[in-house]
Structure formats: structure tokens, C-alpha cells
Amino acid sequence: MILDVKPVRALQGVLELPASKSYTIRAFFIAAGGGPSSIIGPSDGDDALIAASVVQALKSGTRVFHVGESGTTLRFLLPLLPFHTPRAVVKGKGTLVGRPNHHLCQALRRQGMDIRGTGPKESVPIVYKGGTLVGGTIRIDGTLSSQFISGLMIALPRLKTDSRIVVTGKQMVSGGYITMTRRILARAGIKMRRGGPADRPYFVISGRQKFKGLKDFPVPSDYGLAAFLLSAALLVSSKVVLKGNLEGGWPQSDGHIIDFLRKMGGRFTGTAHSMIVRGPSSLKGGTFNLKDCPDLVPVMAVLGLFARGRTKLTGIGHARLKESDRLSDLRRELLKVGAKVSETKDTLVIDPKASYKGGQVLDPHHDHRLAMAFTVLGLKIGCKVKDIQSCAKSYPAFVRDMKHLMVFS
């Protein structure tokens, strides 16, 4: 489906922010570890619904799992298989096909599991033929995804023996997501210790730990999704109130958007329960390291189109391995509107121009975050966004919520 986005005169209104997809999926898998749980206000995105169905399937003893397009669900599921089934096939579809899992599968094989994915990247489908997961020292490359590490953290406390996760590779990416995993595991009574350098840490996890559940756990609002609403409100005339659970006790990697926007000159106020934006703000470029928050790449690139001076996004090579190649695919689409964008292996550089070509058809390459970023762009210059239904992966109500805010006359 194509969404025809027209330039707006203003954005105005009050919205409830969607729940965090990342915390929701973590909560579902950790709650399955045992103890009474009640998860309040979870995400209703496709990935979260898939995670819920997979957790239920684990309990039923099924041997065929369908994880849809959810990379997080896949990587949290694999280390848990020996606890629930003697063998299994894990299937995926769409943007998940071709995404790499070889670092995780290699680590699991070294720890006793007979598991193998498809092709050199060990993508889906992935076949588990038996074997157990044993503790000890587990070395895993952290340069592609932190989800491999989070998945191990959720599984290892169930073992009878202690474990030590040693992160290898040049540097660990998306470390903030590991902090999220550790924080919610601690809420469930699971303890672990971190040591070593920031880019190549290790984690010591005792075995025989008991999950006490997640009773009355309110899922925080999603800063990564709020980023699109905040950015839109900063680019046009606006008076927007975004309400939600923004308590600071639950860190999010995408929470960096607040610091980034303020560094760019964005004006807004916030409390633990709301953010208020009065736009437009006069934005300035700069250099931003997105190593820990690759999901912010698309919206930051769009903001860079309208900032004063160059915007340089660094540390984002791993963003090429998301639902799309968030460097090349994003650059290719922005060139259609006449943008001046260049890329290297792990950077994206945006030099703003005085005007852009409106009315172009932009392809998000089945990436929900590209689709939402292009919609924000359309509010300024007008464009048509293909495959807008891809937003349902994380934010099913995105188009409805944006239309609720739009003022045309």
C-alpha cells in the first residue's frame, strides 16, 4: 500500500506514545522463566505479537516455531530450545531471511547444541537436532548484534553451572540493549556481574538462579518510535503533547534521541509522563555516534536534510544488517528527492540543500523505520511512501496517529 503524504501547515494534538517493542519482547521471554508475571501495556506491534506466540509455543512443546520477521524473537529463542524440546525447526520470513545468525549458532555449537542455520550467514530456517546448552566460558562476537548476547543472558541462569560470556570482536555494538536486558532480568531476580572494557566486556552469570517473575511490570514507552513524532513536530509548525511512561529507571538505547535533538537545537520539554513540542525549531547539523542506537539512523538522516551545516552519522556499519541496509537503501531513496548524501562502510553524511523534489515515490525496502522516516520527510516536501503497512512491525497505529496531528489549512 502506498501512502500519499502531503506537506502540512502544522501538527497539533495529543498522542499516547506506543509501548517499547524491545522491553515487551524481553518481558515476554523473561516472564516465561518462571514466577508470577503481569505485563502492563505491552506493544501491539507485529514483532511483539510474534514473540508472545513463540513463548506460548515453547510451553506447548511444539517442534516448529514461526518467528515472522522478528530478529529479536529468533535470537532469544535459540538458546532456550534445549530447555523445552529435543529438536526443532525455526522458520522466518520477509526481511528476516538472509539476516546473519552465524555468531550465535557458532557459540551455541561450542556449548553443546547441534544447531545450524541456512547458508554461510546461518539465516532462517534454523534446525536444532538436539544436544544441551552447557555453561562455562562462552565467547561470542559482538560486532553484528547485541541480541545474541541478550539471548544468552536470558537462558544461562537456568543452567546448573555458572557461565561467563566473553564478548569478542573489534567492539560491541548496541550495548544499551544489553543494559535493558540486564535491568529487566534484575527485576525478575536474576543477578550477573559485568567486567572488562566497555567495548569488549564479559558477564558472569551464576547457574541455578530462580526467576521470580515480572509482577505488575509497566512497559515503558518507546523512545525509538517517539523519535519520529518528535522529529516531525520539530520540522513544522506544531503544538504537540506526547504522553506515556517515560520513567528514567528503564534505560533505552533510543533514548539518545533526546540528547541528539537537543544538540541539534530542538526545543521541547519533558517529564516522566509527557513531552511537549512547539515547532518548528531551527536545527543545526553535527557529528553523532549511533553505534548503540542504529534504529535512529533513518530519522536522523531526514533531520539532517533540514539542518544548518553537515550532519554526519558514525558507527553505523551494523545498521546495514537490519530489516534493510539502512545506509545504502536509505541513501538511494533520499537521492530521489535531490538530497546530497554520501556513505562509507560505517558512516552516512548529509549535506543540506535549499530545496528538494517533492512528490517522489520512496521505497522503504520493507523496513518499518525507513517507512516512518519517509513519512516525516513527506510532511515537509510531500512524497509517496510504498509499503506503508510495514510500520505494523513496531507501530501499527503510526499512520492513524500522524493523521490525527495533521493540519492542512
Image: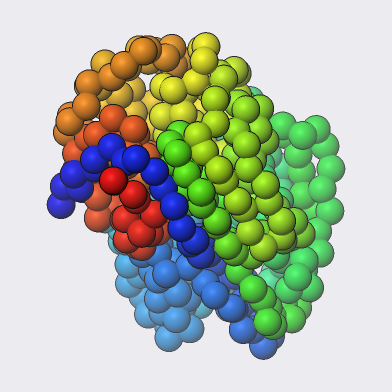
Residue 336 lies, in percent from the top left, at 22, 21
The residue closer to the viewer here, 8 or 170, is 8
Q: Is residue 173 above or below residue 228?
A: above
Residue 103 lies, in percent from the top left, at 51, 42
Residue at x-position 28% and y-position 37%: 7
The way the protein has been coloured in the rendering is rainbow
The residue closer to the viewer here, 110 or 204, is 204
Using the rendered view, name the quadrant where residue 32 is placed.
bottom right
Using the rendered view, name the quadrant where residue 184 is placed.
bottom right
Q: Residue furthest front?
A: 409
Q: Is residue 339 above or below residue 232?
A: above
Residue at x-position 62% and y-position 27%: 265
In the figure, is residue 195 to the left or right of 90? right
Q: Is residue 130 visible?
A: no
Residue 267 lies, in percent from the top left, at 62, 36
Residue 206 lies, in percent from the top left, at 80, 64
Residue at x-position 63% and y-position 42%: 268
